[in-house]
């Protein structure tokens, strides 16, 4: 619930995007139906897209704020310390999708980035809402979105 999300924000040291919080209150993480995002650059996965497999929820050991959540994943995999890991990919570790708190909009909402296996940061969307709205169900994607 809301108290768990406030506790997660305190443990992570950030304010989570309202759209992410709304999803957590509905489903608390899990496998999205739309899992593909078009990119304008080659990624570890393909010439033109990435795939996400799980939205990290809150609470529990594997929640975004849990013992095996974002802070653990950043340390374990050497991701840049720029925000919060919010999506796993099929590789389950070498790459991920993060909220990038270095790139916040006027309302303070972080951008969304892909961290590839070489730790290159690829900007995906200006906000979490735009990222979720831009996910598609299958490959054969339209031109990359920003």
Image (spheres, rainbow, N blue to C red):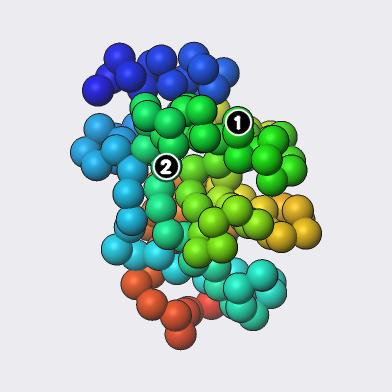
**Numbered badge on residue 53:** none
Along the horizontal axis of the image, is 34 left or right of 67? left
Specify the farthest residue to the bottom.
140
Residue 59 percent coordinates (x, y): 37, 27
Quick check: can you spot residue 85? yes
Image vertical order of residue 85 relative to residue 114, above or below:
above
SS at mark 1?
helix
Task: Decide which of 85, 140 is in the foreground and name it.
Answer: 85
**Left or right of 29: which side holds 91?**
right
Residue shown at 49% from the left, 14% from the top: 10
Report the side of 43 relative to 88 (left or right): right
Mark number, residue 56 = 2
Residue in the picture at 47% in, 28% down:
66
For disc 1, the neighbor class at 10 Å (few under 14, some 14 to 19, many from 20) is: some
Look at mark 1 in the image and give the residue it sits on: 71
Please identify the quadrant where the C terminus is shown: bottom right
Structural crowding at the residue carrying mark 2, measured as other residues with C-alpha within 10 Å and reported as few (<14), some (14–19) or many (≥20)? many
Question: In x, y percent, where is residue 47?
Answer: 64, 80
Q: Work out whether 95 lies above or below 1.
A: below
At 42% across and 59% down in the image, what residue appears?
Answer: 53
Q: Secondary structure at mark 2?
A: loop
């Amino acid at each position: 619930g809301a108290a768990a999300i406030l506790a997660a924000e305190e443990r992570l040291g950030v304010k989570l995007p309202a759209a992410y919080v709304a999803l957590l209150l509905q489903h608390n993480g899990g496998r999205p139906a739309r899992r593909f995002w078009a990119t304008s650059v080659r990624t570890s996965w393909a010439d033109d897209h990435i795939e996400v497999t799980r939205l990290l929820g809150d609470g529990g050991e594997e929640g975004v704020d849990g013992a095996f959540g974002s802070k653990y994943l950043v340390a374990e995999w050497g991701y840049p310390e720029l925000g919060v890991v919010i999506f796993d990919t099929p590789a389950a570790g070498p790459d991920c999708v993060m909220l990038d708190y270095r790139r916040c909009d006027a309302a303070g909402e972080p951008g969304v980035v892909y961290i590839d296996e070489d730790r290159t940061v690829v900007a995906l969307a200006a906000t979490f809402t735009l990222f979720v709205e831009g996910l598609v169900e299958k490959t054969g994607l339209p031109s990359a979105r920003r």
